[in-house]
Image (cartoon, grey):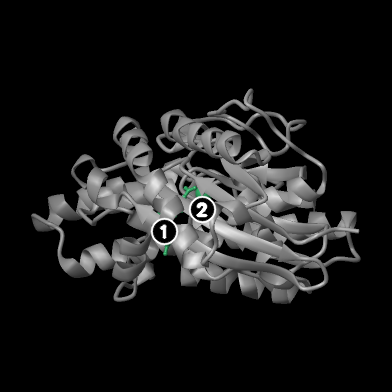
Amino acid sequence: MSHTVTILGLESSCDDTAAAIVRDVPGVGPEILSSVVAGQTALHVDFGGVVPEIAARAHTEKLDSCVEEALAESGLSLAEIDAIAVTAGPGLIGGVLAGVMTAKGLSAALGVPLIGVNHLAGHALTPRLTDGVNYPYLMLLVSGGHCQFLIAAGPGTFTRLGGTIDDAPGEAFDKTARLLGLPQPGGPAVERAAVAGDATQFRLPRPLLDRPGCDMSFSGLKTALLRERDRIVAEKGGLRVQDRSDLCAAFQCAVTDVLAEKSRRAIAEYLTLAPDTPLFAVAGGVAANSAIRAALETVSDVSGVKFLAPPLALCTDNAAMIAWAGIERFRSGARDDMTLAARPRWPLDEGAAPMLGSGKKGAKA
Ligand code: KG4
Ligand code: ZN
């Protein structure tokens, strides 16, 4: 018979330091007792992107206070924690190391098990934390460093149906913001600017739609956007606010079209493999974009599958998803020890061919 499990999760693989406590009660389900996220946006703002060394140092400084805050918010003491779960990759190695070392220290001091979690599994298992869905289900993981369609069939069993061959969409949003003088992270800034924009003013490409399957490409999009920006600047002597909004709207529309069509194909392929569990879920920072969420919901409706998108705070990086993935691994008997390594690259589907490219936010896996 399984017992109640309470796990402290740590996340530090990119530019958010996070700690969270999740409790899972058999027959009742999981509850997020606390979730603390300390972002680093201000530290990287002058550099136009995440600087790995600055990120690693900030994680080292912030992890302890995040843990203390997560404990205080939950009303628990360290003595009530059954295990420590930590992101052990993929991600920026300095940050991952900071988290793994903190977790090892806590695990050794408390005498509780240590569980290394794949960051992507954290995102991919979020629908089970938020909605208690059963395996298998189809997942689109779409963030600043990743973009892939996965069939989740167990806590460590994932099959990749396709993914980006170059940039991740979040990375493309961030680069677009940079090209247009908008702040980082680019996704929310581009989405805000796009509200007042007219997407039809610019014709941007829809890469790889002419090829079968559900692989994607986003790097050509930002090059096309750069060309349009330079054309406007040459013609008008500068970029007006309206031009910028129109460019943002056109860019967001192109990304949305690609994700929607590739999702339609991934769903069709998934349904041939698992017709009895028609569920499509999305997670990762880009899933916070309302135009993209709406398009994916429409595609799901048309394809006859249920659509699930976690609340925004659980779409972007957080430690509740790491604690939950830790609970799933803990219940399946998995345990790590002091030899747990930090891995910059760690594909979820170890059997699949590696995707090309490795972005600023880490390997594409
Ligand atoms: O999952 P996440 O927090 O971190 C990674 O693991 O990458 O995702 C961050 C990414 C950033 O590139 C950010 O620009 C993008 O998600 N993002 C968005 C939105 N909010 C965050 N992209 C488009 N629209 C948004 N509203
Ligand atoms: Zn992430």
Residue with the mark numbered 2: 206
Q: In the rendered image of this protein, does residue 273 appear above or below residue 314?
A: above
Q: Of the residues shown, which amino acid type is indicated by label 2?
A: Arg
Q: In the rendered image of this protein, does residue 7 appear above or below residue 257?
A: above
x then y, percent, for residue 215: 64, 44
Quadrant showing the N terminus: bottom right
As measured in the structure, the alpha-carbon distance from the residue carrying label 1 to the one carrying label 2 is: 44 Å
Query: Does mark 1 have its CB less than 8 Å from ligand 1?
Result: no
Query: Does mark 2 have its CB less than 8 Å from ligand 1?
Result: no
Query: Left of 234 or right of it: where is 227?
Result: right
Residue 284: which quarter of the image? bottom right
Residue 139: which quarter of the image? bottom right
Q: Is residue 155 visible?
A: no
Give the residue at x 32% y 34%.
57
Q: Nearer the viewer, residue 75 or 330?
A: 75
Q: Secondary structure at mark 1?
A: helix
Q: Secondary structure at mark 2?
A: loop
Quadrant showing the C terminus: top right
Query: Left of 209 or right of it: where is 97?
Result: left
Residue with the mark numbered 1: 69
Query: Left of 181 or right of it: where is 27?
Result: right
Q: Of the residues shown, which amino acid type is indicated by label 1?
A: Glu
Between label 1 and label 2, give the one nearer the viewer: 1
x then y, percent, for residue 231: 22, 50
